[in-house]
Image (cartoon, rainbow, N blue to C red):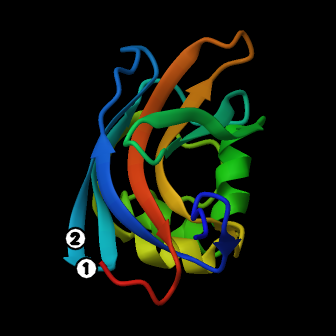
Amino acid sequence: MTCSHFDAGEYRINYKAIIKCSSPKSGIESNFYLSKLSSDRAELRGNFTLKIPLDDNLTFDMNMAIKDSVGGWRDNAHLLKFPNACSTLKNLLGIEWRLFINSFGINSLNCPIAPGVYESSGYDLTAATVNSSFPKTFFYGTYKVRFHFSDKLNIAHGCSNFILEIKRPWEIE
């Protein structure tokens, strides 16, 4: 029997949920939700409020916890920390950056993104995985992914939590 937590390969992502995390009132507040288009496609909807610019003075962190065989979360399965948050997001999303930014009504493709309230008309998360600079192979499993922004003093300025399943391309629900 093979343990899927250690198997890796080409994948597809099944987005399960977005969980609101408590964000400081002085930074980046997100109010996202998923709109399921089909069993294997989902859109990001909702809004985010920038009370500070989303710029390269911020750091972008991603912490992935993996669901273990008894249903608990093993924290810190994968940790990524990127300085220059805005430029990093732009580079990670690659050709998807334009579609992502435009879905929130932002017309400038450049960093920084000015303070304001931005509401999404719907952004196809499925396409983001395929068309971005994300790794093309990954470890299979169910993950709780925490995206976090902080400043140079490591003061938190916002976060979002996603629950997702990383599955083999041919696996169905």
Mark 1: secondary structure: loop
Q: Position of residue 111 (x, y in %)?
A: 66, 47
Tally of marks = 2
Q: Is residue 122 left or right of residue 96?
A: left
**Which residue matches tag 1?**
39
* Residue 81 visible in image: yes
Q: Which residue is located at x 55 percent, y 43 percent? A: 113
Q: Amino acid at mark 2?
A: Lys
Left or right of 32? Residue 124 is right
Residue 122 visible in the picture: no
Residue 56 position by quadrant: top right
Q: Is residue 147 above or below residue 150?
A: below
Check the picture and name the quadrant holding the N terminus: bottom right
Indicate the secondary structure of the residue bearing disc 2: strand
Mark 2 to mark 1: distance in Å? 7 Å
Q: Which mark is residue 20?
A: none
x%, y% of residue 3?
59, 62
Is disc 2 surrounded by few (<14), some (14 to 19) or many (20+) residues within 10 Å? some
Q: Residue at x 43, y 62 (%)?
A: 165
Return the x and y of residue 25 as percentages of the image width and height. 36, 14
The label on residue 36 is: 2
